[in-house]
Amino acid sequence: MSRLLEMRDIWIEGRTDEEWIPIINGVDLTLDKGEVLGLIGESGAGKSTLGLAAMGYTRDGVRISKGSVVFDGIELTTAPARVKRDLLGRRIAYVAQSAAASFNPAHRLIDQHVEAPVVHKVMSREEAMRDGIELYRRLRLPNPEEIGFRYPHQVSGGQLQRAMTAMAMSCRPDLIIFDEPTTALDVTTQIEVLAAIRDIVEQFDTAAIYITHDLAVVAQMADRIKVLLKGDEVEEAPTREMLAHPKEDYTKSLWAVRSFQRPQKPPAPPDATPVIRVDHVTAAYGKVPVLFDVSFDIHAGRTVAVVGESGSGKSTAARVITGLLPPRQGQVFFKGEPLPADYRHRTKDQLRQVQMIYQMADTALNPRKTVGEIIGRPVEFYLGLKGTKKRERVRALLDAIELEPDEFIDRLPGELSGGQKQRIGIARALAAEPEFIICDEVTSALDQLVAEGILRLLARLQDELGLSYMFITHDLATVRAIADEVVVMKDGRVVESGPKDEMFTPPHHPYTDLLLSSVPEMDPDWLTNLLAERGVENIGDAAAGRM
Amino acid sequence: MGAILKIIAQRLVLGGVTLLVVSLVIFLAVNALPGDFAEAILGQGATPEAIEAIRRDLGLDRPLWERYLVWLARMLQGDLGVSFAQLNFQSNLGGTQLKTVAEQIAPRFANTIFLAGVTAAIAVPVSLMLGVLAALYRGSIFDRAANIFTLTSISSPEFFLAYILILFLAVLNPVFPSLSNIYEGMSFFDRLERTMLPALTLTLVVTAHMMRMTRAAIINLLASPYIEMARLKGLSPMRVIVVHALPNALAPIINVIALNLAYLITGVVVVEVVFVYPGIGQLFVDSVKIRDIPVVQACCLIFAGAYILLNLTADILSILSNPRLRHPK
């Protein structure tokens, strides 16, 4: 095999205010023709920056301060812009994390698809269009003849991601950088995209750098894996070797994350009154119905995981419970008492009993308030504590979420890490001293190690305070780790519910089965076996059926 | 499309209400000014009898609300009335031909539209181009020079800009005539030549807003993932901005253009005076001076109507520039 890309001793810096801060510290990276390299690490490890540097590109405020990037004999760090532009799109292409954000909303898919081949004079517009439709077909997009003539907002996320892969293929590049291409997708959609990417990369013998934070995903895609931590290389090895015998402690800790699992609590006695009972609820946004006759119970001290793909109605159910969206039919009971449908008609005590923790701690915390003010507000509002008493209570809460009070009480959210922000979100919910907390995808924006810390914290708080959780998630590993009972939702309906252990042992409802089998596993042969089991045709049908 | 038609209908109805309110406010405001038409036209040597006579002739002796309602009733039938000056002239000198307000305003308004049109034809493309180039070469000497130049011109009084242009383009280098006294029957190119200096003056006034909004709206988008994607396809910086950023930046730019075009129709009195351009602005100012209410009312309705229609057009174009609204799922 011949060498396609050679990055030597790469140092990359990013500017904050007046200072240059290191992002990548002297990393080497090599890639042969047709080879797929998996680049893995937590957020902030510098994966994307390194991936972009492989294209000779840096974002605004970032620079390659040292090192060389040689692509097929051409030194990219010193090449003039014109030379780089000639390579980009034609011989090196990029697939971004969010296809929805990376397709220009103002142009049709096919127009964006043909742009690179036409501008680089690889094909005429007509040829490029015909070729685009052929690529859409190979990537098993539904209606390949017609889908390109839609605008990005008219196409679903999974399809957009495949269309973007097709776009990257438009000039048959030698190298494609895949930057977390399936992170924003549901598990069932992810499989289709992974299979499509793997097929097409094999068909055209394209080399690829596959960036992700998900080990199980990279195990399916890559020939070799390189692990990054805070801009440093931890280790690199062929995929199977890396999975079987990780050398470094950090890599081992990544592998170990999935080991956290709480035993399931015994089911509540049949005559117990549930803390929250959702009773035959039907709800709609305007004229669009989103929930159909949804019922489930949440018992004291238990965690009920509500799982489903995006659009299944999980978060809407939470909005009904909190009173933000009054249901069309049905009711919500708190300890046997009906809760007024609209939060504005609830008493302060009813409001206090139902608290929420949000997915995006970033946007859920007021950036202009200190941690002390953020947590102090519900303490004062619900419990009427002021002055020293309030401050003491806030400190106790910070202790409870394992953050040192003296260090954190006067900080602003901008000075916290993602995991710390999420802990503040938890403290704010606890401050009201509720019996019931809704956790809406609280770990999905976090790295695995950090997410595990949050899960452990929530579990400990539940044991100490007897809290009940409604845990909304699309991640089945999280469900396995923390749930006592599971409610599976699809298209606004509950398709299956029951104790966790039952849910994870066959036989399942067919949809639960699809969800469970779609969660990637560490085994590098998992995707191949799964596809063989389901039959490739079957997947195409499933994709078309979801349209 | 149905949604757009609904918006247009709603806005037109609201526009009608706005015009009604405007007419009432203007009527009250002009009447609140000290003096009336009779006093203004007769001047200091007026006898109380003469003033009374004119007031009686024009109906100024009747109560305020009655005069407004009569005017409103006629206006709703499409009759804007006859100006006080015309009525007074006829009753004193016995002329037979009465020019209605509509006849008086029409040629003036046409001139104003012509001037606004010429200005827009120069200013809009120039500011878009300058905005795109400033965004492309942001931070460069060109960007700063364009900013300084347009800000200077928008910050200077209009008459000052007008005189500078006259100095350089009419006196030192006689390229254009400094007087813009256009009249009926002139050929289009003569008209255009005479309109050039006022149009250039107004271009200097309106370019800054439009250029800076274009630049800001484009730069705002340059951090978007789809712009990065366009760059990573190896497109030239110019193509990235014109093909990928500009179409998504149109909505705010269109709104600023509409506001500036409305200004060209309603706010150009000073420039008209400097160049002796027979537009609607001069007529308006003269009519306010002599409290000629029918003319003032008609001019204000035109001004308000221009704002309403241009803003409506801007809103519709903004909606049409958004593919999400143009092509619903």
Image (spheres, coloured by chain):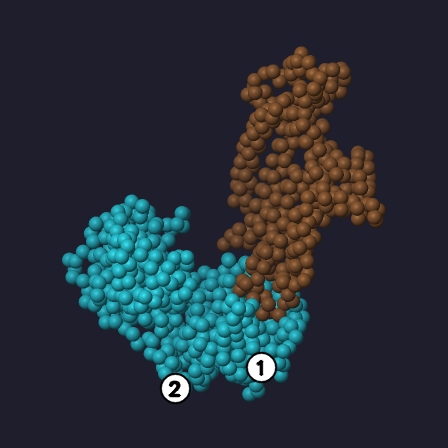
The circle on residue A68 is 1
Say which chain tag 2 marks.
A
Q: Amino acid at mark 2?
A: Lys
Between circles 1 and 2, the one closer to the viewer is 1
Q: Residue furthest top?
A: B49
- Note whether residue A260 is visible: yes
- Residue receiving disc 2: A247
Q: Amino acid at mark 1?
A: Ser
Tell me if mark 1 has few (under 14), some (14-19) or many (20+) residues whose alpha carbon lies within 10 angstroms of its own: many
**Tally of numbered discs:** 2
- Note whether residue A143 is visible: no
Q: Residue at x 80, y 42 (%)?
A: B178
Q: Which residue is nearer to you in this view: B44 or B319? A: B44
Q: Residue furthest bottom?
A: A1
Q: Quadrant of the N terminus of chain A?
A: bottom right
| Image coordinates for residue B6, horizontal then vertical, percent | 52, 41
Quadrant of residue B157 in the image?
A: top right
The circle on residue A82 is none
Q: Which residue is nearer to you in this view: A291 or A238? A: A238
Residues indicated by labels 1 and 2 sit on the same polypeptide chain: yes
| Image coordinates for residue B3, horizontal then vertical, percent | 52, 44
